[in-house]
Image (spheres, rainbow, N blue to C red):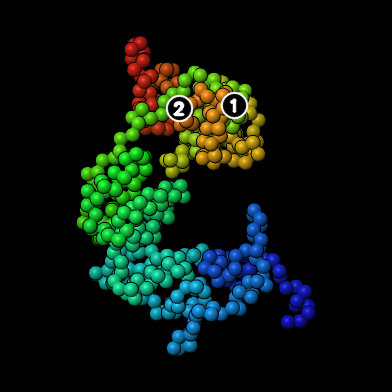
Amino acid sequence: MSNSDETIRPVFVSRKTAAALLEISPDTFDQWVRSGFVPPAAVNRGQITRWHWPTVEAKLAERPSNVEADAFGREPPFCERPDAPPVSPKSDYPRGVFRIKKPNGAEYWYYQHDKGKPSRGPIVRLPEFGTPEFYEALRDIRGERGERRNDISALISDYKAAPQWSSKRPATIATYESALVPINEQWGDRAPDSITTGDVIDLLNKFADRPSMGNMVRVVVRKLMKFAVQRGRRQNNPTGEVDTFQKDTDGAKPLTPAAWAALNSPACPTAVHRLAVLGRATGQRISDLIRMRPADRDEEGISCTITKLHDKPHWCLLKPGEAAEIDSWGVVPAMPYVLRPDGRRYTTDAMRVAWNDYLATPEGAALAGFTPHDLRATKVCDERIAGKNHQQISALVGMSVPMVMKYSKHIDQRLAARGSV
């Protein structure tokens, strides 16, 4: 290379520039980074990500010491991780292993037993190409470690590789992951068709002191067993006769006048006060309240999406006094009404921490026993006192009629006693 070439040699390059220099797509470059074939970015500052090009070149020039050519002088595919076991070229992959390439360049690998035959089995998505898990799955298919495993651990892996898993929200996946841990610990080496209703009950009994977690484990077991039935690994679902844990039947409760006064006290943090006003005005969950912005104001109400209903659009009517206070906050249209003191956005958990921190102070002591979710019950009870029926409140808040009736139970009793309903 001439001196003139050296003077224009890149040093720190972006993802797109690196992909162009390697004559590959940016998606393929991302895959190389994930598989370890290309080193990670040397600069990662917020939205600025850069790779040190001389280091990338040096890495690409290496030949993994643990990889040897086969009898025909061939090396494993270039996108295989250096620490992954050698594997045959793509043309030699086990029968039934195939690839689907999307228009955007993304590649997905699958396996189907007896592919193309009447006896063909279900299509199972394989782990990401180039990862150790991918080559482990190939070894299982080849039978290098005996027959393909048919236990709960393998069933969980297949379930997580199925399209219905990746389509879930990240928060849902995290919740399901936590529930799969005790399932795998209890039954990991057992065959799916060996799990009985009694086994499910024994597992759930371990969560008698944590009913919410027990109910979530039951949900995930039911889905996992349904997946096993669909894949022909058992004949029925053993969770049909398993009851859920009974939780607090009252659920959320309306705030007392003292608790509401604490939320309007000068000592109340701005973010907590605004959350309370928005919550009582709209009856929405904390995860949706922290996303509301001035830009969402719509005529005499505010538009939002209900996260728990897969971002279903909803419009909340605001009373004139509520709208006046909310509009007086002077927030930039594109920013949430509820922000941290440092100007950053709140997460749901961080907002609960802020609520609890205020509750722990003398000024917030009246909030003891109340959570942000109780703002929903307060909204329901406000509307019942104002004379609306359960169906009207259901449409107003965006919750089911049974849930409205659950939240308004105590108010309904008092209204009935007074002859108001």
User: Which is more foreground, mark 2 or mark 1?
Assistant: 2
For mark 1, does the 10 Å Cα neighbourhood hold few (<14), some (14 to 19), or many (20 or more) residues?
some
Please say if the residues under marks 2 and 1 sit with CB atoms less than 8 Å apart: no
Residue under label 2 = 369
- Residue furthest to the bottom in view is 72
Q: In the structure shown, which secondary structural element does the residue marked by tag 1 occupy? A: loop
Q: In the structure shown, which secondary structural element does the residue marked by tag 2 occupy? A: loop
**Residue 420 or residue 54, whichever sits in front:** 54
What amino acid is labelled 1 in the image?
Cys
**Residue 42 or residue 110, whichever sits in front:** 42
- Residue 299 in sight here: no
Residue under label 1 = 268
Residue 364 pos. (x, y %): 55, 25
Residue in the picture at 64% in, 53% down: 46
Residue 13 pos. (x, y %): 67, 66
The mark nearer the N terminus, 2 or 1, is 1
Residue in the picture at 59% in, 78% down: 62
Residue in the picture at 57% in, 23% down: 363
The N terminus appears in which quarter of the rendering?
bottom right
Q: Is residue 67 left or right of residue 16?
A: left
Residue in the picture at 38% in, 26% down: 407
Residue 284 pos. (x, y %): 47, 32
Residue 131 - label: none
Q: Is residue 205 above or below residue 43?
A: above
Report how far apart the C-alphas of labels 2 and 1 lie in the structure.
Answer: 17 Å
Residue 281 pos. (x, y %): 51, 26
For mark 2, does the 10 Å Cα neighbourhood hold few (<14), some (14 to 19), or many (20 or more) residues?
few
- Residue furthest to the top in view is 418
The C terminus appears in which quarter of the rendering?
top left
- Residue 174 in sight here: yes
Instruction: Please tell me how many numbered marks the rendered image carries.
Output: 2
